[in-house]
Image (cartoon, rainbow, N blue to C red):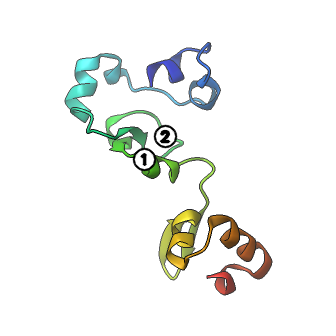
Amino acid sequence: MLERCRNPNNSHWHAYGGRGIQVCERWLTFENFWEDMGTRPAGKTIDRIDHAGHYEPSNCRWATAPEQSRNTQRSVLIEWNGEKAVLKDWALRLGITDRALAIRIKRWGLERAM
């Protein structure tokens, strides 16, 4: 987290620090980070709830890799019948691939595709 946000030589810096993503001042001390986030649960890593937001207590959680893969800049959020979910989750519910759903939405529009 610190390397990605604070070290321009880090290979992932362009997607974090280079985009302005910062680590809150409090978390520059590990003890404060640990006090806020607790021990990392098995199989989870730090995730920003709002992927455009900073690393800070109100915007971070422990999440699994599948949870994190649905919370990226590339994720397509779709609202249908008053419910919001990413395209991948809608596709799973419909029993089709996310690629197939994306093509259907592009061709037919959201209502018919769903």
Q: Secondary structure at mark 2?
A: loop
Q: Residue at x 71, y 75 (%)?
A: 105
* Nearer-the-camera pick, 44 or 17: 44
Count of marks, rendered view: 2
Image height check: is 30 above or below 81?
above
Q: Secondary structure at mark 1?
A: loop
Percent from the top left, x then y, of residue 74? 63, 50
**Dot 2: within a 10 Å radius of its alpha carbon, few (fewer than 14), some, or many (20 or more) residues?**
some
**Dot 1: within a 10 Å radius of its alpha carbon, few (fewer than 14), some, or many (20 or more) residues?**
some
| Disc sitting over residue 73 in the figure | none
The amino acid pointed to by label 2 is Gly
Q: Are marks 1 and 2 in contact (CB under 8 Å)?
A: yes
Disc 1 to disc 2, C-alpha distance: 8 Å
Percent from the top left, x then y, of residue 100? 69, 71
Q: Residue at x 54, y 42 (%)?
A: 52
Left or right: 50 as drawn, with respect to 109:
left
Instruction: Please name which of the two marks, 1 or 2, marks the residue nearer to the observer.
Output: 1
The amino acid pointed to by label 1 is Ile
Image height check: is 87 above or below 33?
below
- Residue linked to disc 2: 53
Q: Residue at x 62, y 12 (%)?
A: 9
Quadrant showing the C terminus? bottom right
Q: Residue furthest right?
A: 107
- Residue linked to disc 1: 49
Quadrant showing the N terminus? top left
Percent from the top left, x then y, of residue 83? 47, 75
Q: Specify the quadrant of the image occupied by residue 65.
A: top left
Percent from the top left, x then y, of residue 33? 28, 26
Image height check: is 68 above or below 96?
above
Q: Residue at x 59, y 55 (%)?
A: 75
Left or right: 64 as drawn, with respect to 79:
left
